[in-house]
Image (cartoon, helix red, strand yellow):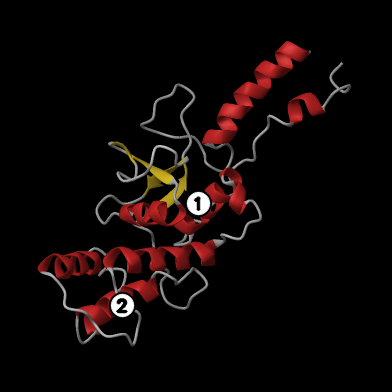
């Protein structure tokens, strides 16, 4: 009977992705959902939008070896200067105030501060770029796999033991920052597109099919 053993199939149902905000918080909201539903350490929801944004800024500070505010600036190599310049340049359209900084170090600090701005901020929130997910992969020790129109890309330095978390980009390719959501595979496995992320996610889609199979077998 369909009501005798509901627990037999209820366990295989996975949570559906939330309604990801359409504003600049879509990136951290997607990361938060993926971590909360896929990594046991974050099941308590501690990695909310604010925490993810803070983790991103901290990760970039470590990657770029940016001294803390007030600390002495060490002698930089030409490669380090180039890395800082590329980091700022990729985000200058989002952080125009960086242009007002007196030197490159303060420009980098302006961008790092901007990364913590969410949609509730009076200024424009910082929208995640693709390489921000590589910085977050390093910070959380997971492999964020970004699905874009021309394929998928993960964190090249990820260990094979790191869990893969999939997300996709829906935005303006001209500037590279736009709407991020949990990745949703099409029913025909055509990875060039996706279904509505508010109704079914990659995990939910796979487990949804599993649930149907289990129901058929059991009942």
Q: Nearer the viewer, residue 135 or 19?
A: 135
Residue under the image location 29 percent in, 80 percent down:
97
User: With respect to residue 193, does 70 lie above or below?
Assistant: below
Q: Position of residue 14 (x, y in %)?
A: 64, 36
Front residue of 200 and 12: 12
Q: Secondary structure at mark 2?
A: loop
**Residue at screen point 52% across, 39% down:** 196
Q: How many marks?
A: 2
Question: Which residue lies at the image location 13% right of the left edge and 70% below the top edge?
Answer: 77
Is 3 on the left-hand or right-hand side of 158?
right
Tell me, yes or no, if residue 25 can be seen here.
Answer: yes
Front-lying residue, 33 or 127 = 33
Q: Quadrant of the N terminus?
A: top right
What percent of the width, then of the height, locates residue 219?
79, 13
Instruction: Tell me, yes or no, whether the two marked residues, 1 and 2, touch with CB atoms within 8 Å.
Output: no
Q: Is residue 26 left or right of residue 81?
A: right
Q: In this rendering, would 93 be left or right of 178?
A: left
Q: Earlier in the sequence, mark 1 or mark 2?
A: 1
As helix, strand or loop, the secondary structure at mark 1 comes to helix
| Residue 117, position as x, y percentages in the image | 45, 72
> Residue 93, which numbered label?
none
> Which residue, given by chain and number where applicable, does mark 2 sit on?
67
Q: CA distance from mark 1 to mark 2?
A: 29 Å
Residue 50's x, y, as percent? 53, 67
Please give the label number shown on residue 30.
1
- Give the quarter of the image for residue 161: top left
Mark 2 neighbour density, 10 Å: few (under 14) some (14–19) many (20 or more): some
Q: Residue at x 31, y 52 (%)?
A: 172
Q: Residue furthest left?
A: 78
């Amino acid at each position: 009977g369909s009501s005798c053993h509901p627990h037999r199939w209820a366990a295989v149902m996975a949570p559906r992705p939330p309604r990801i905000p359409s504003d600049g918080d879509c990136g951290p909201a997607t990361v938060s959902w993926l971590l909360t539903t896929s990594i046991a350490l974050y099941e308590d929801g501690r990695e909310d939008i604010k925490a993810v944004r803070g983790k991103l800024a901290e990760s970039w500070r470590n990657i770029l070896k940016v001294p803390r505010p007030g600390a002495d600036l060490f002698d930089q190599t030409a490669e380090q200067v180039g890395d800082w310049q590329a980091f700022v340049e990729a985000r200058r359209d989002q952080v125009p105030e960086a242009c007002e900084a007196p030197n490159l170090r303060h420009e980098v600090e302006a961008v790092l501060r901007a990364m913590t701005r969410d949609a509730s901020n009076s200024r424009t929130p910082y929208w995640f770029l693709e390489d921000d997910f590589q910085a977050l992969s390093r910070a959380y020790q997971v492999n964020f796999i970004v699905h874009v129109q021309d394929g998928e890309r993960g964190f090249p330095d990820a260990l094979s033991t790191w869990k893969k978390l999939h997300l996709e980009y829906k935005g303006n390719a001209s500037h590279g920052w736009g709407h991020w959501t949990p990745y949703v595979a099409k029913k025909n496995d055509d990875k060039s597109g996706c279904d509505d992320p508010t109704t079914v996610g990659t995990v939910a889609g796979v487990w949804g099919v599993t649930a149907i199979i289990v129901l058929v077998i059991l009942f």
